[in-house]
Image (cartoon, coloured by chain):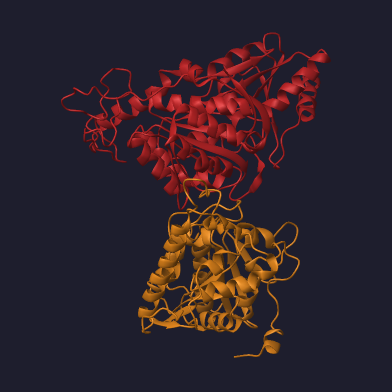
């Protein structure tokens, strides 16, 4: 693995000056991923969302590479077309240079409306990387729930009130769905573990065929945390096993980090305003439900990874 | 007892819909309609209704159809790109006579376009967005108060004729705040879909029992099994490819609108009697037109307005009659020119018909309407 010093010399494809919020995970995640493309030519496709809007406000662009924004649901399909045409041109000898293709979508554009087009792209085997920047809701339109929104979260379409304490359904397990496409590479990563992110992005770019990375990408407005604490919050997400980091290489599941001790989910919920109502008397059952969901999923993940099925020691 | 409230257009839409009996909303966030979903999420459970957020606009429209067939008054709300995605299901609802309300808050297009800015680019899509011959009703409010009233009317028309009703708003009306006097619930006229006679021996879901072209509608769960399909079907609801079955079905569907124009069509005439120049307009642009008319009248210019409340079916008759009296008709619209084509088709050929088109994401101003009126008069 390259040193930090070496990585810092890779040209920036997402330049500073974009209008993403302070303390947003999207800029950090995107730069980390693109850094692993090193000196290659890159074509970026972007689903509608915060990243697209905040990096391309007329008459400016933060992108130092080819950039395509198609309709909300089409990032996977559009890059499929680009990549297929590229291969044809290469075959005909009309294009000499090598290119890498990467799509970025939020959880709305990936878990929900764009799932069909992503699934198609993965199944057809296009040589592209799809990165989901999962901030757990539709933040661009003002914080509506998505199928990535964690159970219990308060959003404008799963409002926490006297009767219903926020979203009632657990999150969709998108990374597992992508792995089930039997693509060469699928992974889940967090900016708090930057070396892990870099390795995963490098593998994703290097494999022949489609690759998928799911990045936890906190949103200060939707999650309501103290903006400087973003990386710390991601770390807690990994340590509480809310966001396990793992990879699936050619069908083999590998756990990349095993927390040394049992950190209760409250540690992740407490710093966030979207979960504040869970700490009012009468909502204890919700925290229990959330913890159970996390523990159950953790044990299932351990099984897939061939690890002993035990919760971390308390 | 009525109560006054300062309201946003999107809020008035939800209030009106719930007053009309909406008990189901399926939607997907999209600017500038999102508040309709958010307020439905908050308010529907309070009246025993159900809000569900779907994975996209196709699914939202699908869920609305399912809920309506199960007996609830159902609505969805969206904007341009989402309206495009809903089109196939709108055609399904139209063919299967599923009452439902589809709100389209128009924003700049095409494609993602100008998500936060107003437009009126879906005059034609609202009518012909889905494929094939099909009936549809499109109504368009010009104020927050009217948004409340039209949300009720949209449900009433949809329930009465078993036709999808498009509530065609625009970003200005959706986000504008105005004082609205809410009527007492007892003063609101509510129309519910016709149900089949419980004693009926064999229910044919698509049979015109009453001779008015509108079959009574059972609900899933009523204990009367019935078949629903997107294929062309006969009175039993089962598919058929026979030419006479197809002809009967399409004629009956179109006839539900064509035979009830007087009931469905609604418009407002302002100072048209002596007007030499008449402005034909709808939605937020009508507000600018009204201001322009008042100012022009002060200058002694004889100008009036026909404000369309119903856009489809198009009020041909009033346009035709007006065009025989007036020298000029001006059609201001926030698009490249859509309504004007229908106005031209309906109007007398001697009448001078001129468009005022603005498609830059800004409302047409009263000054622009005034300038156009003067330009047209001076040229004549």
Residue A171 falls left or right of residue B66: right
The x, y position of residue B379, in whole percent, is: 79, 22
The front one of B69 and A237 is A237
Inspect this view and state whether residue A250 appears. Answer: no
Inspect this view and state whether residue B214 appears. Answer: yes
Quarter residue A68 falls in: bottom right
The quarter in which the N terminus of chain A is drawn is: bottom right
The x, y position of residue B69, in whole percent, is: 33, 36
Residue B292 falls left or right of residue B66: right
The answer to whether A185 is drawn above or below residue A104 in the figure is below
The structure residue drawn at horizontal position 65% and vertical position 47%, both measured from the top left corner, is B114
The x, y position of residue A54, in whole percent, is: 68, 60
Quarter residue A135 falls in: bottom right
The structure residue drawn at horizontal position 52% and vertical position 36%, both measured from the top left corner, is B103
The x, y position of residue B264, in whole percent, is: 48, 20
Q: Residue furthest right?
A: B299
What is the drawing colour of chain B?
red
Residue A2 falls left or right of residue B23: right
The front one of B316 and A256 is A256
Quarter residue A185 falls in: bottom left
What is the drawing colour of chain A?
orange
Q: Residue furthest front?
A: A281
The answer to whether A276 is drawn above or below residue B225 in the figure is below
């Amino acid at each position: 693995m390259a040193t930090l010093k070496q990585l810092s010399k890779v040209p920036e494809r997402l330049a500073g000056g974009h209008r993403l919020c302070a303390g947003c995970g999207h800029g950090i995640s995107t730069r980390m991923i693109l850094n692993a493309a090193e000196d290659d030519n890159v074509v970026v496709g972007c689903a509608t969302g915060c990243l697209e809007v905040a990096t391309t406000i007329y008459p400016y662009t933060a992108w130092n590479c080819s950039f395509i924004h198609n309709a909300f649901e089409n990032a996977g399909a559009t890059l499929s077309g680009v990549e297929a045409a590229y291969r044809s041109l290469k075959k005909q000898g009309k294009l000499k240079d090598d290119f890498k293709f990467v799509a970025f979508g939020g959880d709305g554009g990936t878990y929900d409306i764009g799932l069909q087009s992503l699934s198609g792209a993965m199944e057809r085997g296009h040589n592209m990387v799809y990165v989901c920047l999962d901030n757990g809701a539709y933040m661009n339109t003002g914080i509506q729930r998505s199928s990535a929104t964690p159970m219990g979260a308060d959003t404008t379409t799963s409002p926490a009130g006297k009767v219903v304490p926020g979203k009632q359904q657990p999150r969709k397990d998108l990374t597992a769905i992508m792995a089930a496409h039997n693509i060469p590479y699928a992974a889940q990563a967090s900016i708090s573990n930057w070396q892990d992110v870099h390795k995963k992005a490098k593998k994703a770019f290097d494999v022949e065929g489609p690759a998928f990375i799911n990045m936890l990408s906190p949103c200060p407005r939707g999650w309501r945390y103290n903006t400087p604490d973003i990386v710390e919050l991601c770390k807690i997400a990994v340590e509480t096993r809310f966001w396990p980091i793992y990879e699936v290489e050619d069908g083999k599941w590998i756990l990349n980090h095993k927390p040394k001790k049992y950190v209760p989910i409250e540690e992740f919920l407490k710093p966030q305003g979207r979960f504040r109502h869970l700490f009012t008397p009468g909502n204890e059952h919700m925290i229990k439900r959330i913890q159970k969901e996390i523990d159950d999923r953790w044990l299932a993940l351990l099984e897939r990874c061939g690890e002993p099925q035990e919760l971390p020691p308390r | 007892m009525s109560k006054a409230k300062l309201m946003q257009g999107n809020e008035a839409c939800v209030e009106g819909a719930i007053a009309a009996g909406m008990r189901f909303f399926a939607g997907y966030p999209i600017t500038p309609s999102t508040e309709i979903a958010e307020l439905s999420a908050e308010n529907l459970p309070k009246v025993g209704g159900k809000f569900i957020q779907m994975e996209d606009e196709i699914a939202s429209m699908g869920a609305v159809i399912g809920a309506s067939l199960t007996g609830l008054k159902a609505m969805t709300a969206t904007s341009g790109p989402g309206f495009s995605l809903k089109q196939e299901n709108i055609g399904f609802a139209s063919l299967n006579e599923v009452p439902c309300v589809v709100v389209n808050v128009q924003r700049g297009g095409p494609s993602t376009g100008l998500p936060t800015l107003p437009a009126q680019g879906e005059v034609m899509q609202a009518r012909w967005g889905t494929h094939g011959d099909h009936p549809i009703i499109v109504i368009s409010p010009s104020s927050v108060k009217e948004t409340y009233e039209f949300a009720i009317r949209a449900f009433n028309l949809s329930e009465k004729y078993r036709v999808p009703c498009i509530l065609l708003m625009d970003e200005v009306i959706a986000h504008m705040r105005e004082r609205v006097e809410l009527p007492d619930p007892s003063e609101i006229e509510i129309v519910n879909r016709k149900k089949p006679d419980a004693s009926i021996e064999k229910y044919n879901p698509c049979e015109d029992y009453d001779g008015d072209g509108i079959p009574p509608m059972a609900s899933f769960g009523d204990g009367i099994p019935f078949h629903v399909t997107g294929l062309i079907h006969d009175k039993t609801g089962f598919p058929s490819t026979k030419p006479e079955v197809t002809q009967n079905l399409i004629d009956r569907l179109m006839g539900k609108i064509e035979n009830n124009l007087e009931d469905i069509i609604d418009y407002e005439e302002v100072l048209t009697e002596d007007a030499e120049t008449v402005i034909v307009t709808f939605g937020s642009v009508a507000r600018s037109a009204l201001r322009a008319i008042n100012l022009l009248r002060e200058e002694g210019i004889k100008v009036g307005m026909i404000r369309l409340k119903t856009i489809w079916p198009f009020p041909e008759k009033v346009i035709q009659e007006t065009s025989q009296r007036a020298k000029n008709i001006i059609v201001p619209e926030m698009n490249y020119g859509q309504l004007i084509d229908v106005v031209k088709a309906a109007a007398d050929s001697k009448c001078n018909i001129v468009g005022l088109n603005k498609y830059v994401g800004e409302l047409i101003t009263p000054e622009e309407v005034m300038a156009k009126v003067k330009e047209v008069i001076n040229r004549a």
